[in-house]
Image: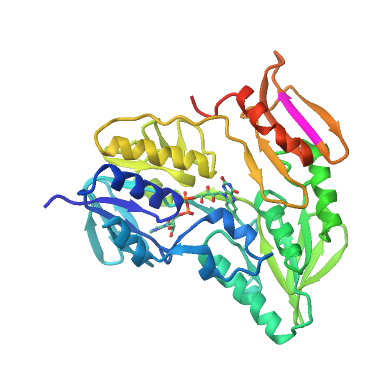
């Protein structure tokens, strides 16, 4: 019997591909391998669960067992692949060697804390990038609540990008005391020009978030029962828990060690999601597809559809549309389509909290946009006029 199609990772990319492929080919042997619980969950919901006090089990729509049953696939959970032997067509899992037919790498991205988290902060400092991380942070909040039911948990969030801002909004809406610390002078600096970032910052402040922008972190330590944060402007903060949201990097070491072409943007693939090694594909946050690593859901869904068609015998190149990101900050709705190259100018329209910023190139063509407040309703009109991410 020939070796099965093997998918590394059961995030939205890995599971999405398995579903698409099963719809086209009911017979094909599929093995999914995951370092985590393998539960089917929507990662974007992680930063909306604390306002509603959603326990982790409510975020998983299906267990790994149900996924295996539904897909007619083998799902191996809590199984970390240590190496890929391209020449032999085998994976190393501890002492085990596992043959694959074709291989799809969908290992996602990993948080990138700017410093090593001190041992003394174990159980107090967190990153939240998957359901297991959410489980751990949720449990820490529950422990605090049981110890002191009337105490509002003090949470310091480091990083004011998409993940930091969404968690700040969600946790403050959940009744916690939230401080948001970042070196940039306004939130979402990679997606928004400063005036729109300030609008979001003001809305977060109005909803109760204590903003410390334009500030670096000098030190993080445990004093008595508190986590102490010393900021570089001399300010000191005490917190019960710290959430580090300083960005993600593609988890591409397996591919790098196996000799596949990679860079800081992830595993390089062509428009067919094929890596530099024959029979090995990549998609999702780990993949840099024809020079683009978007790290959002829509591109990975388009990739899963295209790769499923290719694997089922119809070679299909992926293309990405002009898909804006909807930032989940109910305090101030934000939609943004980041320009792929620095714009010549941002043209800003609107007033108060309702702003539209149009990124234009030298010829005055629209290459991206950002919207806040009531202006988010312009997203469809502007997306139609903006260039596709990958044509
Ligand atoms: P992951 O979900 O990270 O899956 C990686 C898988 O690989 C896991 O199963 C892991 O266990 C496995 N794995 C890794 N290494 C190994 C190994 N060595 N052996 C075996 N298995 C391994 N995008 C949007 O479009 N809209 C949003 O609103 C949005 N909100 C977000 C909110 C948050 C809080 C976060 C963190 C992200 C958000 N994103 C959003 C981004 C989006 O969720 C991701 O792009 C997407 O979920 C990535 O899926 P993935 O399958 O590529 O990776």
Residue at 11% over, 52% down: 1
Residue at 28% over, 42% down: 24
Which residue sits furthest top?
363
Residue at 33% over, 51% down: 7
In the figure, is residue 299 to the left or right of 337? left
Eyeballing the image, is 330 above or below 368?
A: below
Relative image position of residue 170 (x, y in whole percent): 70, 60
Q: Is residue 158 visible?
A: yes
Residue at 63% over, 22% down: 385
Q: Quadrant of residue 224?
A: bottom right
Q: Quadrant of residue 358?
A: top right
Eyeballing the image, is 343 above or below 183?
A: above
Who is closer to the viewer here, 333 or 83? 333
Q: Is residue 357 magenta?
A: yes
Q: Quadrant of residue 91?
A: bottom left
In the figure, is residue 153 to the left or right of 7? right
Q: Is residue 351 magenta?
A: no
Eyeballing the image, is 234 above or below 144?
A: above
Over which residues does the magenta segment extend?
A: 355-359
Q: Is residue 214 visible?
A: no
């Amino acid at each position: 019997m020939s070796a099965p199609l093997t998918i590394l990772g059961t995030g939205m990319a890995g599971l999405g591909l398995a579903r698409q492929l099963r719809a086209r080919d009911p017979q094909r042997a599929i093995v999914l391998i995951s370092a985590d619980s393998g539960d089917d969950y929507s990662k974007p919901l992680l930063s909306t669960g604390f306002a509603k006090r959603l326990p982790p089990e409510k975020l998983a729509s299906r267990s790994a067992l149900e996924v295996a049953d539904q897909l007619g696939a083998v799902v191996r959970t809590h199984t970390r692949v240590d190496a890929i032997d391209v020449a032999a067509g085998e994976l190393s899992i501890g002492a085990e060697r596992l043959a694959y037919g074709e291989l799809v790498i969908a290992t996602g991205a990993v948080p990138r804390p700017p410093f090593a988290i001190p041992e003394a902060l174990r159980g107090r400092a967190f990153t939240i990038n998957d359901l297991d991380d959410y489980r751990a942070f949720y449990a820490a909040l529950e422990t605090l609540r049981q110890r002191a039911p009337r105490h509002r948990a003090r949470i310091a969030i480091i990083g004011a990008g998409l993940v930091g801002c969404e968690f700040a909004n969600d946790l403050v809406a959940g009744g916690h005391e939230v401080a948001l610390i970042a070196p940039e002078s306004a939130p979402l600096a990679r997606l928004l020009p400063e005036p729109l970032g300030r609008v979001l910052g003001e809305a977060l402040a109005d909803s109760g978030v204590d903003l410390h922008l334009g500030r670096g972190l000098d030190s993080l330590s445990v004093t008595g029962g508190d986590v102490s944060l010393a900021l570089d402007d001399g300010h000191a903060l005490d917190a019960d828990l710290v959430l580090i949201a300083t960005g993600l990097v593609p988890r591409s070491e397996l591919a790098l060690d196996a000799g596949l072409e990679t860079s800081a943007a992830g595993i390089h693939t062509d428009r067919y999601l094929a890596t530099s090694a024959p029979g090995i594909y990549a998609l999702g946050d780990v993949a840099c597809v024809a020079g683009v690593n978007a790290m959002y859901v829509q591109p990975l869904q388009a990739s899963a559809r295209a790769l499923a068609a290719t694997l089922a015998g119809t070679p299909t190149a992926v293309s990405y549309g002009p898909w804006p990101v909807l930032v989940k900050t109910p305090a101030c709705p934000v939609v943004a389509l980041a320009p792929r190259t620095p714009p010549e100018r941002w043209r800003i329209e609107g007033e108060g909290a309702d702003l539209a910023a149009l990124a234009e190139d030298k010829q005055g063509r629209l290459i991206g946009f950002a919207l806040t407040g009531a202006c988010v309703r312009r997203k469809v009109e502007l997306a139609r006029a903006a260039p596709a991410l990958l044509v």
